[in-house]
Image (tube, grey):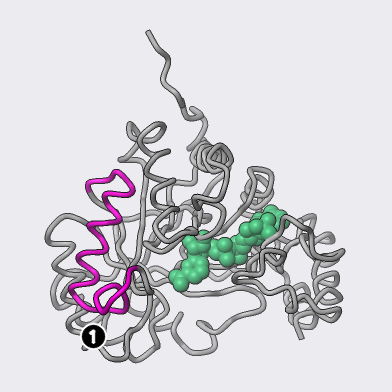
């Protein structure tokens, strides 16, 4: 008999193991405290073997949630294609153990129907995503951003109808402003299509969802919250303590620009690194722990460019408590 290509670790859900799970708002769904994001490092230009190794490592360590979007790559669509190829070869027998999300809302294809929040775009985009990922359905389908020109009823009803069609099990909303989010939660509840989860950027440097009241509203409405860029794209790690490594995201300069790594940023990062060391953590671990220390947060979506990074990041779940003194030191270092 030919052995299966991939046989996941029997220890992946070990009680004393690697991962904890939190309930997403008022729902039946448990999400790992750390989810894996495929925005970077899973495109057609990235080595397939490394993408496969990261996905296997994640699943072997209790990460059941994988976050994608139609335009992740580069080029657009290629992260879904990479995921689909590895899903077909490795993960198909484990589909029911996986929570897979995708999104539409940013520019994806030319012309007036490949961007923003129309019903036409969302429906067509999800069909394309399912084909690229070799899936019959996604677990969560997100509207990726707020469209100020499309009536929110059109966007939201498209999401409701997508769930009714069975092509997605749950609805997610990403980066909507406070007032529109509250209207959306209400609209969806009235149609028995409760919003499962809200996605926004939250990390030690960027606390906008806390400051704007979005996190509170999400919590009050029984919606889960999942934080993206918990490491500020790598700024809150040891990556830039001594300059800009050639293989880093800042060196690529697409979304993280090298000129953001100023001497002042490096000085503050070193201070944070010292605080992390005194907690017995790497800076990446402390950054993840800090986000998870807020119990309104369901999960963080971490990115990584190697299994070593993911292994480091995962250990953050062992210590998500902070003393008042540590929190004050962090606030002081952030400035
Ligand atoms: N909804 C939205 O609009 C939206 C927007 C952005 C992101 N997202 C989601 O959030 C996910 C995560 O975002 P992100 O990639 O910006 O996340 P991030 O976790 O803030 O940053 C990931 C980067 O940090 C570095 N890194 C990770 N672990 C490390 C470690 N242990 N030690 C040292 N360096 C480490 C790596 O940089 P190098 O690559 O330089 O090694 C890695 O690529 C995305 O993949 C996507 O799924 C959603």
Residue shown at the point (56%, 48%) measured from the top left? 46
Q: Residue at x 52, y 38 (%)?
A: 52
Q: Say which residue label 1 marks.
A: 152
Q: Is residue 54 magenta?
A: no
Mark 1 CB lies closer than 8 A to ligand 1 = no
Pick the residue in front: 85 or 198: 85
Question: Residue 153's image quarter?
Answer: bottom left
Tag count: 1
The kind of secondary structure element at disc 1 is helix
Residue 262 in picture, x, y percent from top left: 81, 79
Please identify the quadrant where the C terminus is shown.
bottom right
Q: As drawn, which residue projects farthest toward the front?
A: 110
* Foreground pick, 47 / 105: 47
Whether residue 305 is visible: yes
**Residue 1 located left or right of residue 170:** right
Quarter of the image for residue 92 reads top left
Residue 208 vertical position relative to residue 142 in the rendered view, above or below: below
Is 129 included in the stretch rendered in magenta?
yes
Q: Residues within 10 Å of mark 1 (few under 14, many from 20)?
A: some
Considering only vertical position in the picture, is 122 above or below 16? below
Does residue 300 appear anywhere in the picture? Answer: no
**Residue 309, position in %: x, y?**
67, 49
Q: Quadrant of ligand 1?
A: bottom right
The single residue placed furthest to the top in the displayed view is 1
**In the image: residue 255, left or right of residue 124:** right
What's drawn in magenta, residue-wise? 109-136
């Amino acid at each position: 008999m030919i052995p299966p290509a991939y046989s996941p670790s029997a220890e992946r859900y070990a009680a004393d193991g690697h991962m904890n799970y939190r309930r997403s708002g008022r729902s039946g769904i448990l999400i790992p405290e750390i989810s894996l994001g495929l925005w970077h490092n899973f495109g057609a230009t990235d080595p397939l073997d490394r993408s496969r190794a990261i996905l296997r490592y994640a699943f072997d360590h209790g990460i059941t949630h994988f976050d994608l979007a139609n335009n992740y790559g580069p080029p657009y669509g290629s992260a879904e294609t990479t995921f689909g190829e590895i899903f077909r070869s490795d993960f198909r027998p484990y589909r029911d153990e996986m929570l897979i999300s995708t999104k539409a809302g940013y520019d994806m294809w030319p012309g007036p129907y490949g961007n923003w929040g129309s019903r036409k775009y969302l429906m067509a985009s999800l069909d394309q995503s399912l084909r690229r990922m070799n899936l019959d359905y996604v677990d969560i389908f997100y509207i990726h951003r707020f469209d100020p020109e499309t009536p929110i009823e059109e966007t939201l009803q498209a999401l409701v109808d997508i769930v009714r069609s069975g092509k997605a099990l749950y609805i997610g909303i990403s980066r909507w402003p406070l007032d529109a989010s509250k209207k959306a939660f209400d609209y969806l509840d009235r149609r028995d299509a409760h919003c499962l989860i809200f996605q926004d950027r939250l990390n030690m440097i960027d606390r906008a969802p806390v400051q704007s009241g979005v996190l509170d509203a999400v919590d009050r409405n029984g919606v889960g919250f999942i934080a993206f860029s918990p490491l500020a794209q790598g700024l809150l790690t040891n990556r830039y303590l001594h300059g800009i490594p050639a293989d880093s995201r800042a060196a690529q300069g697409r979304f993280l620009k090298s000129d953001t790594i100023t001497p002042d940023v490096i000085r503050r990062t070193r201070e944070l690194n010292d605080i992390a060391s005194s907690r017995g953590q790497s800076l990446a671990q402390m950054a993840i722990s800090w986000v998870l220390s807020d119990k309104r947060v369901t999960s963080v979506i971490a990115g990584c460019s190697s299994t070593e990074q993911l292994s480091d990041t995962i250990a953050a779940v062992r210590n998500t408590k902070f003393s008042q003194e540590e929190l004050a030191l962090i606030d002081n270092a952030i400035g």
